[in-house]
Image (cartoon, helix red, strand yellow):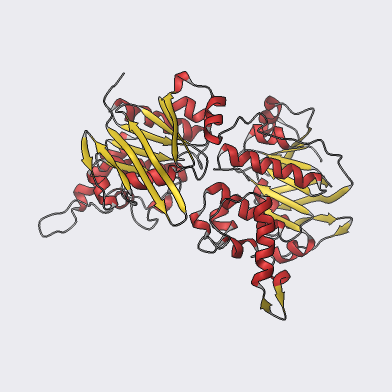
Amino acid sequence: MVDEPILRLDHVTKQFPGVRALHDVHMALYPGQVTALLGENGAGKSTIVKILTGIYRPDAGAIHIGGKLQSFSSPRDAWRSGVSAIHQETVMFDDLTVAENIFMGHMPLRSGKRIDWQLMNARAAELLKSVDADFGSEVLLKRLGVAQKHLVEIARALSHDSRIVIMDEPTSALSAREISDLFLIIAQLKAEGRAILFISHKFDEIFRVADRWVCLRDGEHVGEGLIKDVEPRGLVKLMVGRPIDQVFPKKKIEIGEPVLEVVGLSNPTEFADVSFTLHKGEILGFYGLVGAGRSETMQALFGVSKATAGVVKLNGKTLAISSTADAIVSGIAYVPEDRQVQGTVLPFGIRENTTLASLHQHTDKGILSRVSEQKITRKLGGRLSVKAAHWEQRLNELSGGNQQKVVIAKWLATSPKILILDEPTKGIDVGSKAAVHEFMGELASEGLAVILISSELPEIMGMADRIMVMHEGRIVKNFTRAEATAEAIVTAATGGGHHAAA
């Protein structure tokens, strides 16, 4: 066991106006080991990452690397000290080559300070080979897939000869096979003696890849240790400050009459002959692998795209939805998977985002009433337990879990009859997940009809009354709650099912 850490944080504190982000936090990273940084959204993980990468400076405390005191004034200082980060959302330039992205900010120069393109491409090729990349250094970044862009980010980290590599939710957009490939690269980085800080909400990944763990709660260090000495339940209790006995608080609700009937909904390139019925008070789950057509089907229902065939009836009446405005007026709401791009306006405040889809309810003779907006924001924000300094706080200052709650509040403000939730707990912590699940159950108990799209089997099995499984654009299986097993659902999702009307 390695005794000497390569990086140490001592008594680090960071304060923002009205918010204490970190208080007296300590943490150590060891060469050749993966340390998982745990905590709910808002616990202080992102602030730690920004301090380690030179974006923020701590108000108090110290950073030691290799036993030497460090002070970062910029990300360049962090690079020079051997710290690199691979972020959840890749921050690169699509119209530049792979080599240009890898060496952005530290391109090799010839005399006269001209870029040495030959040397840069050669070095980039070596780095790409070291991470088993299947593409060249001169390819434009926009030609690559998500997993390949992650490899470019890893190569960029290695181009700084980084002793410390931070991975912030690196698997959020990867397939199972791509995740396995990433873990092989992590094993290689460990073998080279690099220290890795790994941030993920997925416990199976943490227990698969990490050697150590550190847990934050409300900006404070609440525990650390070896992964082999802890169980998931213990970590959950540390993260949220209480045990979560029921992660999926499914309520027993009497399912009502049909609300939505979809027959033969089709689009020639995305989905075909999709038929199902949704009832009042029901949570109807949609499961499938990437590319199965779940989101595309729901986006057609919401008017984002257009179906070329099929009939949609709401309370027995045929709908003609040609735009999202038509869907909203009809009582359909859609919480998208990508909340930051499609669900919110991040520079806007909580109030502005909450009322964005229902502004007509807060206007009188064309004049917007801030009092009316504040009233609905307080009501829904309070009901969803949105944690914020005030209702005017900008969304980009909130944690991912609280951003998601605001997106849900925005659509509830339209008083929908049908709520479509597309991956509603993606990228949020276990405490926020439980809160979203509980609220989902409450909405169903009040008679709202809910469609839940999820790639997480425990979530779909824990929350749905019935489960539609899609494969290659078609519903191939329809399970009742009692019939559903993990094996049967996955078999159907991978093509082992048969076409089933719903």
- Looking at this view, is 217 or 100 the one in front? 217
Asked whether residue 349 is in view, the answer is yes
Q: Which residue extends farthest left?
A: 111
Q: Using the image, determine if residue 342 lies above or below residue 1.
A: below
Left or right of 274? Residue 368 is left
Residue occupying the far bottom of the picture: 365
Q: Point out residue 464 in the picture as x, y percentages from the top left corner.
A: 74, 37
* Residue at 63% in and 46% down: 424
Q: Residue 471: x, y in percent?
A: 67, 39
Q: Position of residue 56 (x, y in %)?
A: 34, 51
Residue 357 visible in rendering: no
Position of residue 394 relative to residue 429, above or below, is below
Which residue is nearer to you in this view: 37 or 379? 379
Q: Is residue 387 left or right of residue 10?
A: right
Quadrant in which residue 122 is drawn = top left
Q: Closest to the observer: 101 or 211?
A: 211
Quarter of the image with the N terminus in it: top left
